[in-house]
Image (spheres, helix red, strand yellow):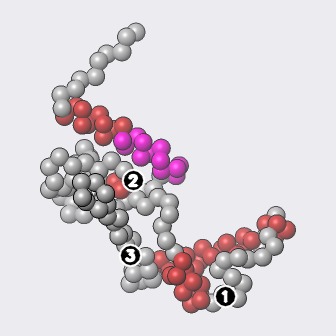
Amino acid sequence: MISGLRALNPALDFGYFTDPEGHDAATIVAGLKTARQIAQQAPFKEWIKREVAPAPEIQTDEELSEYCRRVAHTVYHPAGTTKMGDIVQDKMAVVDPELKVRCLKGLRIADAGIFSDMPSVNPMLTVLAIGERAAELVVAEAGWKPSKPNL
């Protein structure tokens, strides 16, 4: 508690399995089936004693989909939730190229939310680069000018 205020944990709903076309469920079911096929190939076949999850008795697409709906959650790198783009012409853009949030003065977003696509490397490297760029933008706006390096 800070000054009589209680910290609130945000409730995040990523909308998994809510797309009308069923793409989320189809993708995760296909992924489980592929993982099972890979597990039956050498060298994995010799190393794996038994399937732990979802469980060998869960076989049909419907059973696999139901299992995934019960256990799916995000623990890694949610990204792309605050699109960067032309905030004047693109109604879906939340952040402009200077990381400023549409309609909110003095607020920038400097995290993986601005990704349009996930990088192929660990996203933390890109997030750190975004943070560095955000720092440059903030201090430049405040009047800071970089000094020339001593050669």
What kind of residue is marked 3? Gly
Q: Mark 2 or mark 1: name the one nearer the start of the chain.
A: 1
* Mark toward the start of the polypeptide (1 vs 3): 3
The reply to whether dot 1 and dot 3 touch (C-beta < 8 Å) is no
Measure the C-alpha gap from mark 1 to mark 3. 25 Å
In front of the other: 142 or 96: 142
Q: Position of residue 131 (x, y in %)?
A: 36, 41
For label 1, the residue is: 59
Q: Residue at x 47, y 47 (%)?
A: 124
Spot occupied by residue 1 in the image (x, y as percentages of width and height): 31, 57
Q: Which range of residues does the magenta coloring cover?
A: 120-131
Q: What residue type is disc 2 on?
A: Ala
* Mark-to-mark CA distance, 2 and 1: 36 Å
Q: Which mark is residue 15?
A: 3
Residue 123 among those drawn in magenta: yes
Locate the C terminus and report the quarter of the image it occupies.
top left
- What residue is at 67 percent from the left and 72 percent from the top? 35
